[in-house]
Amino acid sequence: MFYREAGDFKTSYTDDNQTFPIKFDRYRYYVVLTVAFGIIPFLINDYWANAFLLPFLIYSIAAIGLNILTGYCGQVSLGTGGFMAVGAYACYKLMTAFPDVNIFFHVIAAGGITAIVCTAFGLPSLRIKGFYLAVATLAAQFFLVWLFNKVSWFYNYSASGQINAPERTVFGVPVTGANTEAWATYLFCLVFLAISAIIARNLTRGMQGRKWMAIRDMDIAAEIIGVNPLRAKLSAFAVSGFFIGISGALFFAVYLGAAEAGDSFGIQKSFLVLFMIIIGGLGSIFGSFAGAAFLVLLPVALKLVGVDFLGWPTDIVAHIQLIIVGALIIIFLIAEPHGIAQLWRVAKEKLRLWPFPH
Amino acid sequence: MPEQLVFAMEVFLNGLMAGVLYALVALGFVLIFKASGIFNYAQGVMALFSAMTLVGIMKGQVPFAHVINVIFGTDVHYFGWTVPALLAIILTVAVMVLFAWAVQKYIFSHLVGQEPIILFMATIGLAYFLEGVGDLMWNSEIKKLDVGLPQGINEAIDNYTFNIFDYGFFIDNLDIVATLIAALLVGGLVIFSQYSKEGRAMRAVADDHQAALSVGVSLNFIWIMVWSVAGFVALVAGIMWGTKSGVQFSLSLIALKALPVLMLGGFTSIPGAIVGGLIIGVGEKLFEFAIGPMVGGATENWFAYVLALIFLVFRPQGLFGEKIIERV
């Protein structure tokens, strides 16, 4: 019924190669874009923006970044928190050093700087593999956070050691600082997410993405068929660092407003983003969205049910949340290693035939 | 003798002692990794959980008291008895064996043959799960653990060094005990794996799963046993760290410190875990002593990882690890 190829004739190569070759899928994509850009900004309020929409948009960007590195290229990284911190501090330094430049370019530049740092920490990946590398990326996590705490140049010698986002505007509307409105911050993050997702989607289905996947599946075999492991791995680190840097910059500048490296970008953040892509689906852009939405919504939902509805104390709910997240990780790895994205694919296949049996 | 050198010697000795404790945690990792190829991230949380359980049993805490009170509106906290340390340790070991059985039955028997990285991520999930259960069961306050181990400055060493250098070294009695216990534990493990039937079976499984299976070794039994032994090692580490700095969440972060130890020593080698632990312990203390004041201190947070990272670039399998051979 839905998702059928029948009647959708492709008459040119461009048609054949489009991102969503199935008509229903394509229209669904346009509808999602219209709702996200045209309807939600009018309905949004502060609670939903801060509790769900902003973290969802920002974590989605980080999850896309990590998914490129871990899901597509197979290099497990536990340094996401540290790289987000690089994005945040780079954005802060740029915002204070060049107040006249539009913040849009600061965020992009912060992504670029993170890409460079991430590539530098990715260099050992040529020698070490698997969880040796995962542990090696912990070095990035701890070293970077320590660096941002100890070198006062990074936080402009402020007494508290915190960085605070000054007010910056886009087209005259403030998007950072104290006087922001929910719809403006939402749209600002959404633009970055949309651009990131489109870039990531097209990178991963092109030549570069296939190289990454070849490296992921078996790097020696990939090398033999002509993939340069140096360039493939480092480009994955660079692209991933770019997205993670953008998300770190947005997380600090738009969402938090004030940040401190150890609190906001600790090892817990690295695990959170890793869990997002495991639950969402390794090697899937849609999975990055699904995982981010799931893990952002879970605490909100648990708090609604546990604290507000059942009246339990918050610490018990927090512990139950740990148990649920841990159990979900294990359940997903056992039952559905490809995450929510795979469930979605199965559902699509079912819908394609429904209501007919064959 | 110049003063700085004497200080450095004291730092060196203290680093050795800290290294022993890292090595204890690392030992648990190596055991499980050798036997099942699982890189057990949850080892640190297991140490925390076992220490919490030990304190809970000793004080006669009611498990899940907080939850029971909330659901049933009761107000129970303690059974009103205390359990002697030795009995409590035995009971805790029983709990860890039960845990090992559950982990094997409900998680890893379903994940046999998966890629190592999947297993690794499953243990991260396990770590979260266990942390939540531990907090829910025994509440998350910082607890004092006292099983009767000696603590405080060792007077004999203090006096002895004072006579030689005019400066008394501060060495904690607990660290000395920990070193002795770690040595005993390693000796015991070596004897167990070399001379007992189960130990030999364990080494056979570590060598080749399928070959071991074909000569009649029960993989399931061996894996449960290995997880139990790792639980026991975690308990020992938990007792040491818990006595030293209280039973609290930071205990589980030691597991992270054990990772660079393993990378230095190699994932598959018990001597490697010990040597790696000592190198990291001494290295980070000396680095903090020599370079720390120049760069603002707190270098202990990252030194171990960076050292391991640099080291791995030159020798990817670690000091004592098996050579990595890859085939297409």
Image (cartoon, coloured by chain):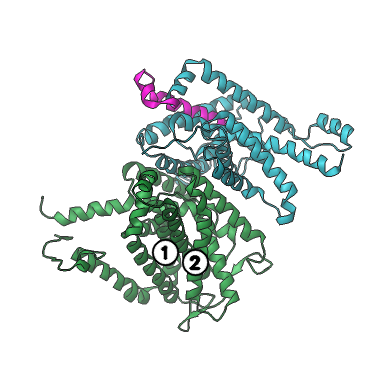
Chain colours: A green, B cyan
- The quarter of the displayed image where residue B7 is located: top right
- Is residue B179 in view? yes
- What residue appears at the point 44 percent right and 64 percent down from the top-left corner? A58
Q: Looking at the picture, which amino acid does disc 2 mark?
A: Gly
Quarter of the image where one finds residue B107: top left
Q: Is residue B210 magenta?
A: yes
Outermost residue to the bottom? A172
In depth, the one of B217 and A292 nearer the eye is B217
Q: Is residue B204 magenta?
A: no
Main SS of the magenta segment? Answer: helix
- Residue A112's disc is 2
Chain containing mark 1: A
Segment colored magenta = B206-235
Q: Position of residue A305 (x, y in %)?
A: 40, 55
Relative depth, front residue between B130 and B23: B23
Q: Nearer the viewer, mark 2 or mark 1?
A: 2
SS at circle 2:
helix
- Does residue A124 sit above or below B11 in this rendering? below
Q: Which residue is mark 1?
A: A52
A117 in relation to B154, above or below: below
On screen, B216 above or below A123?
Answer: above
Question: In the picture provided, is B228 more to the left or to the right than A20?
Answer: right
User: Are circles 2 and 1 on residues that touch, CB within 8 Å?
Assistant: no
Q: What's the residue at 23%, 51% (across, down)? A: A346
Quadrant containing the N terminus of chain A in the rendered view: bottom left
Viewer-closest of B228 and B255? B255
Residue B294 is labelled as none
Residue at left offset 32%, top offset 76%: A38
Please state the horizontal and vertical placement of residue A90, each as a whole percent of the image: 56, 67
